[in-house]
Image: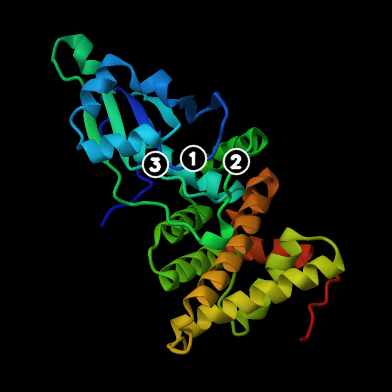
Amino acid sequence: MRDALTVSTNPLRKVKVLAPLSDFPWDGESFLIPGLCSILKRDVVSQQPECQKLLSQLHEVEQRELGEGSHWLVFDQAQNESLSEAAKINIFLLALWLVAPTRARVRFRFELSSELDSGMGHPGSIARMLDQFQFIGSSVHDSVSTEQIEEVSTYVAPMRSIFVAQQRLWNGLVLTLYGCMAFQWQVAFICFSAAAEGILTYKKTPKITKRLAKSFACLTNSGKLERDSAYRAFAHSYDIRSDIMHGRAGNLRNGQDNLKELGQWSDLLRLLWKTVLASPSVMSELEKSDTDRERYFIQREANYEAPTS
């Protein structure tokens, strides 16, 4: 088993990482995401001699696929990095998923080694990224605007800080990532559910669906009608989670309906994450103990009566 968000295991390495993006529907020229990477046009990157040498090692089918992509992620992997190369790529893809779910994926990671300058003669290496983001057809965005890329950039720093801190929200981040990579809808549904529960829960008591739904509604909305709508949507999706977990999902055999339900659940989780990541104070509260979390949610839910049906 592998952890797709790992720390760098060799603090002495220093490489330039080039990651081709496939099916990335943005028509901009370049974009810098501070603290993570740059998005550059393919031709700016792939024509470098060192990159050409690595590309020549791929099968012609793989070369053709990469030739169809419009942009690459580029970043330096410095010494003593807190995040691995794969982790940085996955953080970008996860932030993109939050803002605009697409078919975008990264299949390869090219690493141009600084050891070449030391006379060791290693031009670099190729790593295949086997864990791929999956997509739900009904949720896919066919284009991404520069404004959306700017929004993506705003979520990268708080996501990075959550991972580096490895406190309570870290587990939810990892489970969300694995849900995005899951091939079977039930697996994705359970990962998304566990992520949401990890963000919202603060005690082990009965009637967890109602408690989580109330916390979700009051965290993501402020108006009574909006909260009621969010409460019902969360409770509905969480009930499907319970059916899957407790062996009552045998009747859920309509593939299109299941993917629709998964799409609605992922929408709720994306809203939850965006609410959390947009507020340093909310992030701080949710990293605290169960007792502190309970106190925070009680204050947040004050004067709100959840719908009874």
Marking on residue 87: 3
Question: x, y percentage for residue 210?
Answer: 67, 79
Q: Amino acid at mark 2?
A: Val
Instruction: Answer with the quarter of the image where residue 286 lies.
Output: bottom right
Q: Amino acid at mark 3?
A: Ala
Q: Earlier in the sequence, mark 2 or mark 3?
A: 3
Q: Secondary structure at mark 2?
A: loop
In this picture, residue 278 sits left or right of residue 288: right
Residue 5 vertical position relative to residue 203 in the rendered view, above or below: above
The disc placed on residue 144 is 2
Residue for point 26% across, 21% down? 52
Q: Amino acid at mark 1?
A: Phe
Crowd class of label 3 (few under 14; some 14 to 19; many from 20; radius 10 Å): some
Q: What kind of element bears circle 3?
A: helix
Q: Quadrant of the N terminus?
A: bottom left
User: Which residue is disc 1 drawn over?
Assistant: 24
The alpha-carbon separation of the residues under discs 2 and 3 comes to 22 Å
Query: Which residue is pictured at 69% across the width and 46% down the height?
Result: 279
Query: 10 Å neighbourhood of mark 2: few (<14), some, or many (≥20)?
Result: some
